């Protein structure tokens, strides 16, 4: 199962083609759109969010709300295209009034990609490297998420910190606080911390600056056995880290105890295996974050990611003009002050997709009932072995 996206930030649309979905899987655009809407929320977002009202159109691979086994094509129109159709036209000549973007922004892909592709106009970098691309990634990832939800797998996320302000809510409490997080301006479970976070965002906005932070994903209901210890590229922790790190602005990923675990003795870190009367073989804790040896172990999967402050600044940093070599300030574009809450939603989709791929690998089938039968058989075997019944 795989997908490919296309489209530019100010082009006509964003597209994705998904291949490998089982036939007979019920899918509705409204279920994707609710996650697209969640991505657009969050205190600190910029003016672009008031322009775009993302809605997905399904163009192929679906008939009467059920997949048919052929590639699924998704499309999200860019409403801002009407203001850019002359400057971003796929064909024809560049208009005389077009302004060359030649001031690379520190922290963006502008300079590195300009060198790589031999561009004169750095807008060619900006248009594709923009986080606008995450809208279609959320759409594609939500398809994988909806497939997993059929099997009882649930996704939660929350903001742990913005700048230096941290939430005090423990991971284990997050599933029970899902409604509070949904209604939070910053996707945060700690109301007192959120109030301080909002003040920090406003200070940064007043200074023409930006803020980053840390968010956490918690995924419950995963069966043991997704991923593999056999080859490096099949280890699920590596695949999840790559998926989340590929989101624009993400600079660090940890699973379970992560970096704090590196300072802990092994005897205090690893989760003891115990026998529970009602559940059979179990674990005393979940400091591993639901993954051992690159494989899910049946515990909730816990992943955290650090997002850097957005590098497009209202008060830009020093740069050099790409064309003249003169010292200048970096280019400015419409941008957010803080996008950590939205990044958490994108990460849900990125993780959901990677988990759906591994789920399909484990429970292969050309149609959904075949997958369900394979899953049921496997879980019966797991239950028998954990409870040590012959």
Image (tube, grey):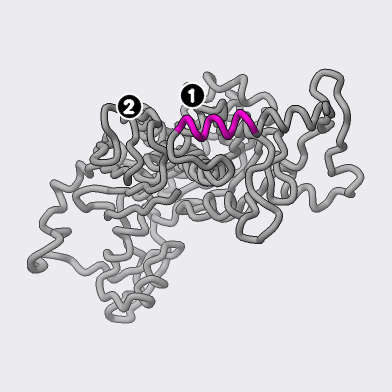
Name the residue located 79 percent from the left edge and 48 percent from the top edge.
261
Q: What is the spatial separation of the Cα atoms under label 1 and label 2, in whole angstroms? A: 18 Å
Quarter that holds the C terminus: top right
Mark 1 or mark 2, earlier in chain: 2
- Bounds of the magenta segment: 368-377
Q: How many marks?
A: 2
Q: Would you say 104 lies left or right of 159 here?
A: left
Secondary structure mostly taken by the magenta-highlighted segment of the chain: helix
- Residue found at the very far bottom of the displayed protein: 325
> In the image, residue 327 lies at what x, y percent?
36, 75
To which residue does mark 1 refer? 182
Q: Is residue 356 left or right of residue 138?
A: right
Q: Residue at 8%, 66% (x, y): give it.
A: 92
**Residue 57: where, in percent of width, then height?**
25, 37
Q: Is residue 378 above or below residue 124?
A: above
Q: Nearer the viewer, residue 380 or 116?
A: 380
SS of the residue under disc 1: helix
Q: Is residue 237 above or below residue 51?
A: below
Please rate how many residues cluster around mark 2, counting C-alpha atoms within 10 Å: few if below 14, some from 14 to 19, many from 20.
few
Coordinates of residue 58 in the picture (x, y in percent): 26, 37
For residue 66, which quarter of the picture?
Answer: top left
Q: Residue furthest front?
A: 390
Where is mark 2, residue-wise? 30
Is residue 126 shown to the viewer in this render?
A: yes
Q: Nearer the viewer, residue 258 or 331?
A: 258
């Amino acid at each position: 199962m795989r997908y490919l996206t296309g489209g530019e930030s100010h082009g006509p649309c964003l597209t994705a083609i998904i291949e490998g979905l089982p036939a007979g899987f019920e899918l509705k655009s409204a279920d994707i759109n609710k996650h697209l809407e969640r991505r657009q929320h969050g205190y600190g977002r910029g003016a672009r969010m008031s322009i775009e009202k993302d809605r997905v159109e399904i163009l192929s691979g679906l008939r009467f709300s059920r997949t048919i086994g052929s590639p699924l094509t998704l499309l999200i129109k860019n409403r801002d295209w009407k203001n850019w159709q002359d400057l971003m036209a796929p064909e024809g000549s560049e208009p005389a009034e077009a302004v060359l973007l030649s001031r690379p922004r520190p922290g963006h892909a502008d300079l590195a990609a300009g060198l790589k592709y031999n561009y004169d106009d750095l807008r060619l970098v900006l248009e594709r490297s923009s986080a606008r691309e995450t809208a279609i990634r959320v759409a594609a990832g939500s398809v994988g998420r909806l497939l997993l939800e059929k099997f009882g797998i649930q996704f939660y996320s929350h903001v742990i910190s913005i700048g230096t302000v941290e939430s005090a809510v423990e991971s284990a409490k997050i599933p029970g606080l899902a409604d509070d997080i949904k209604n939070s301006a910053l996707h945060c479970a700690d109301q007192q911390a959120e109030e301080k976070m909002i003040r920090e965002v406003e200070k940064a906005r007043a200074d023409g600056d930006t803020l980053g932070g840390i968010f956490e994903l918690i995924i419950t209901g995963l069966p043991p056995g997704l991923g593999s210890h056999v080859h490096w590229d099949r280890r699920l922790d590596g695949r999840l880290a790559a998926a989340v790190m590929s989101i624009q602005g993400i600079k660090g990923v940890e699973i379970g105890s992560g970096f704090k675990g590196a300072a802990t003795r092994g005897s205090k870190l690893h989760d003891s295996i115990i026998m529970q009367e009602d559940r059979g073989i179990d674990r005393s804790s979940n400091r591993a974050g639901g993954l051992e040896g690159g494989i899910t172990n049946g515990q909730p999967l816990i992943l955290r990611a650090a997002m850097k402050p957005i590098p497009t600044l209202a008060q830009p940093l020093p740069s050099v003009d790409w064309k003249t070599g003169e010292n200048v300030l970096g280019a400015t574009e419409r941008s957010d002050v803080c996008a950590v809450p939205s990044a958490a939603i994108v990460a849900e989709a990125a993780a959901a997709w990677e988990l759906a791929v591994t789920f399909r690998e484990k429970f292969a089938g050309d149609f959904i009932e075949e997958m369900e039968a394979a899953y049921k058989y496997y879980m019966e075997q797991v239950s028998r072995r954990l409870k040590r019944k012959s």
